């Protein structure tokens, strides 16, 4: 009979599109996973993957095996997690997929007290700005805004219920270039632009008394919003241009006088983020504990 760990390795590789992807999720090395799959193929006497130097794809046999194993392994995981109900405190691993803004503005207020309350839970936070399939990414839950939420997910509020985008510049920049009076004026200013890892470069949006203005910001500096957003703030503080980010992100710099708010009455508001997870009757104990804990935090 095939080893259960080898079966798990096969499912991870098939689900995450290759040995490297599975290694990032499971914590095992790509070579360990490759050896486990070879053992399983030898045990079954059939090839489960077609391998090239650039890709790994399940064969027809591998795809059929994955279809049969996925619900079975899910049932095993659920059965093993039932034991958590007999512990004084839940234990296990919880993996969250969150955008950079949530890691900076939401989780710092939640994670430390949560880990103090549940010391036997290992929390792993994966930060990326693109929307991912939770199951394929190996995550149990995620944080996203309403516009990028999957329809079949359960969502509960997490973090502030209303947020705003803010515009600011340093006193030095304002002294040299002046202060914009209307969003249209931004077309004459140096703007620090942001790009998502998908390649999209979102425009700057403003609204006031039912009127809205969208500005295609322009400037010599472009930063990755998923990894280098702090660079945009640092550059703005140094006088390199105008920065457009979450109000909570810029507020400490405004409070210290390093940045000055601009066009404040035009700052657009939007609904805060949500914690989302698959809508199923049974939740693993670490995820259930996190969901319950999030609902006790007041913003």
Image: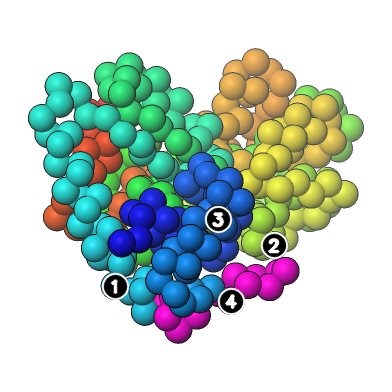
- Mark 2 and mark 1: Cα distance apart in space: 37 Å
Q: Residue furthest left?
A: 86
Mark 1 Cα within 10 Å, few/some/many (few <14, many 20+)? few
Residue at x 36%, y 38% (from the top left corner): 94
| Circle 4 SS class | strand
Q: Is residue 239 above or below residue 183?
A: above
Mark 3 Cα within 10 Å, few/some/many (few <14, many 20+)? few
Residue on which the image places disc 1: 68
- Mark 1 and mark 3: Cα distance apart in space: 22 Å
Tag on residue 35?
A: 3
Pick the front one: 61 or 40: 40
| Circle 2 SS class | loop
Quadrant in the rendering for residue 251:
top right
Mark 4 Cα within 10 Å, few/some/many (few <14, many 20+)? few
59 falls in the magenta region: yes
Q: Say whether residue 230 is left or right of residue 84.
A: right
The image position of residue 113, as x and y in percent, is 34, 19
Q: Are marks 1 and 4 in contact (CB under 8 Å)?
A: no
Residue at x 29%, y 72% (from the top left corner): 68
Q: Which residues are magenta?
A: 50-63
Q: Earlier in the sequence, mark 2 or mark 3?
A: 3
Residue at x 60%, y 70% (from the top left corner): 56
Residue on which the image places disc 2: 199
Q: Is residue 145 above or below residue 147?
A: above
Q: Earlier in the sequence, mark 2 or mark 1?
A: 1
Q: Earlier in the sequence, mark 3 or mark 4?
A: 3
- Mark 2 and mark 3: Cα distance apart in space: 36 Å
Residue on which the image places disc 4: 50
């Amino acid at each position: 009979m095939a080893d259960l760990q080898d079966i798990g390795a096969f499912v991870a590789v098939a689900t995450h599109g290759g040995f490297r992807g599975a290694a990032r999720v499971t914590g095992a090395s790509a070579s360990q996973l490759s050896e486990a799959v070879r053992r399983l193929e030898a045990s079954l006497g059939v090839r489960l993957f077609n391998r090239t130097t650039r890709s790994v794809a399940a064969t027809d046999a591998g795809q059929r095996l994955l279809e049969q194993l996925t619900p079975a392994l899910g049932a095993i995981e659920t059965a093993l997690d039932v034991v958590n109900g007999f512990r004084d405190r839940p234990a296990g691993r919880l993996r969250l997929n969150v955008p950079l803004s949530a890691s900076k503005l939401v989780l710092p207020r939640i994670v430390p007290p949560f880990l103090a309350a549940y010391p036997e839970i290992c929390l792993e936070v994966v930060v990326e700005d693109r929307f991912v399939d939770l199951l394929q990414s190996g995550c149990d839950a995620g944080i996203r805004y309403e516009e990028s939420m999957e329809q079949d997910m359960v969502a509960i509020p997490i973090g502030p219920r209303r947020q705003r985008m803010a515009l600011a510049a340093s006193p030095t920049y304002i002294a040299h270039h002046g202060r914009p009076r209307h969003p249209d004026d931004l077309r004459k200013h140096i703007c620090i632009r942001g790009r998502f890892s998908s390649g999209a470069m979102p425009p700057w949006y403003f609204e006031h008394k039912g009127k809205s203005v969208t500005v295609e910001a322009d400037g010599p500096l472009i930063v990755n919003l998923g990894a280098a957003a702090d660079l945009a703030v640092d550059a703005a503080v140094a006088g390199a241009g105008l920065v457009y980010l979450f109000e909570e992100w810029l507020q400490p710099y405004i409070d210290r006088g390093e940045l000055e708010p601009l066009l404040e009455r035009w700052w657009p508001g939007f609904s805060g983020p949500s914690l989302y997870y698959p809508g199923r009757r049974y939740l693993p104990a670490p995820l259930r504990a996190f969901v319950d804990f999030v609902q006790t935090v007041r913003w």
